[in-house]
Image (tube, rainbow, N blue to C red):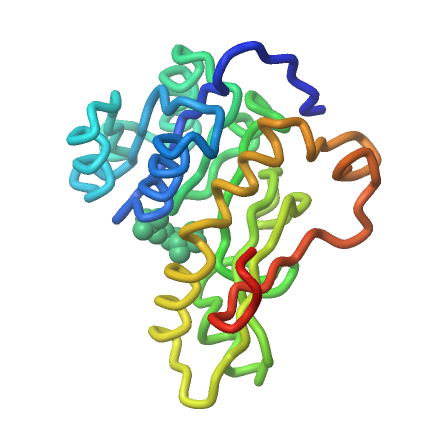
Amino acid sequence: MTDIERTRPARLVVLISGRGRNLEAIMRAIDAGELDAEIVLVASNKPNARGLQTARLAGLPTVAISPREFADRESYDAALARRIAADNPDWVVLAGFMRVLSDSFVERFAGRIVNIHPSLLPKYKGLHTHDRALDAGDRDHGASVHFVTPTLDDGPVIRQGRITIRDGDTADTLADRIMDRIEQRLYAAALDDLISGRVVWRDDGVYRDGQRQSTPLIVDYDEDAPSP
Ligand code: GRF
């Protein structure tokens, strides 16, 4: 589904709602030459999203489309999809985009939408992932980059990053550590998997280096783990 022949940098449209730290990490990876991609649009449902300002300062094209201007989810998503399609993206990258996308949006960019979620999927889809990992007494926790399907946080995982939960961790310390240790690197690595063609989503599953993956790649990102 995602075999894409390319002779140019991959075109990314990045969707954000908030601070945009994942967006910044992707921008840094591109600037460092680690990701053969260009960000052709940063779009947000929140006109005041801090990440929009970061993007503008970096000279990236931005657009804010507020749901308030639309009667319902379908019409909002149709407008967002039209705007995104105008930039002809190879990948639609959800980076802290806090809206559930309608089936028609997902189908329009089928196989080309990816998301980062702060848990080791399939655990803890949805919100409050850090609290839920702590409440369950989990020993580890992390983040996942996955393909987006119409069901929330349910699509096949591309790669995951994991850290060990420490005594005394709170939802806030976990969120910070997952952002600092994992998310600052995970999205760029997963996008590189896709852009390089190392990872491909076919009808019968996700392939990495030609091998069908029964479990996703998990990399440890603890301070004392070897540098990933
Ligand atoms: C991240 O924790 C991401 O995993 C989640 O939303 C947060 C976005 O943060 N989906 P930022 O906007 O990238 O700073």
* Vertical relation: 44 (above or below) 104: below
What residue sits 79% from the left and 46% below the top? 213
What residue sits 37% from the left and 60% below the top? 180
* Vertical relation: 153 (above or below) 112: below
Q: Position of residue 7 (x, y in %)?
A: 57, 10
* Vertical relation: 166 (above or below) 44: below
Q: How many marks?
A: 0
In the image: residue 113, left or right of residue 207? left
Q: Dividing the image into 4 quarters, which one contains the N terminus?
A: top right
* Vertical relation: 110 (above or below) 192: above
Along the line of sight, the residue nearer the viewer: 22 or 112: 22
What residue sits 41% from the left and 83% below the top? 169
What residue sits 21% from the left and 29% below the top? 58
Q: Dividing the image into 4 quarters, which one contains the C terminus?
A: bottom right
Q: Position of residue 221 (x, y in %)?
A: 52, 64
Along the line of sight, the residue nearer the viewer: 189 or 155: 189
| Residue situated furthest bottom in the rendering | 167
In the image: residue 205, left or right of residue 10? right
Q: Position of residue 14 (x, y in %)?
A: 39, 32
Along the line of sight, the residue nearer the viewer: 14 or 79: 14
In the image: residue 11, left or right of residue 104? left
Q: Position of residue 93 (x, y in %)?
A: 46, 34
Question: Where, by quadrant of the figure, is residue 210 drawn?
Answer: top right
